Image (cartoon, helix red, strand yellow):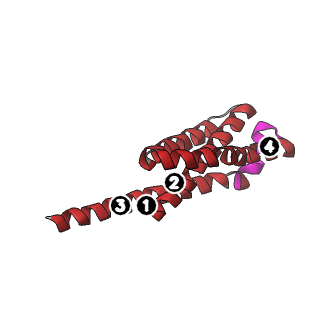
Amino acid sequence: MFLADKKTFNIQSWFVIFAGSLLFFYTYILMNLLNPLAAFIMKDFALNAHQLSNMSSLYFYGNFLMVFPAGILLDNFSIKKLLICAMILAIFSIFLFGLADHLSILYVSRFVCGISASFAFLGAAKLATR
């Protein structure tokens, strides 16, 4: 009986690590999202290169501002709950980006995406060390 519980625990552990790794991979894709879409976004929103570069950099501003608070939160609270919140934020940000009709909405969605990415990277690293 004890061996069966241990085997189930191992499968659950691998599933959690896999989910955290997928979140990190998803946020990595979101980080590079603007590269193939830049010409279309510039055309559809009538953006210049400066506005596009600002939109691209907001991802990294959000990531930079939340790396240290995310590390503190991941040390003090449940990794599972924080990663679920990061997943929800990432999904919300990409839907907001897809439905955007104004430049400010694009800016906000990229910033929120960067915030979720800081939790994804640190959460995956913390899960890998357990």
Residue at position x 39%, y 57% from top? 16
For the N terminus, which image quadrant? bottom left
Residue 46 or 118: which is nearer the viewer?
118
Badge 4 is on which residue? 54
Residue at position x 35%, y 60% from top? 13
**Image location of residue 121, percent across then percent down:** 57, 56
Q: Which numbered disc, 1 or 4, marks the residue that appears first in the sequence?
A: 1
The Cα–Cα distance between marks 3 and 1, rounded to whole angstroms, is: 9 Å
Residue at position x 75%, y 47% from top? 56
Residue 84 or 75: which is nearer the viewer?
75
* Amino acid type for the residue under numbered disc 3: Ser
Q: Are discs 2 and 3 less than 8 Å apart at CB? A: no
**Image location of residue 66, percent across then percent down:** 64, 44
User: On residue 123, which mark appears?
Assistant: 2
Badge 1 is on which residue? 18
Badge 3 is on which residue? 13
Q: Which numbered disc, 4 or 3, marks the residue that appears first in the sequence?
A: 3
Asked whether 87 falls inside the magenta stretch, the response is no
Local crowd size for mark 1, using a 10 Å CA cut-off: few (<14), some (14–19), many (≥20): some
Q: Are discs 2 and 4 less than 8 Å apart at CB? A: no
Q: Which numbered disc, 3 or 1, marks the residue that appears first in the sequence?
A: 3
Identify the element where label 4 is drawn: helix
* Amino acid type for the residue under numbered disc 4: Asn
Q: Which numbered disc, 2 or 4, marks the residue that appears first in the sequence?
A: 4
* Amino acid type for the residue under numbered disc 1: Phe
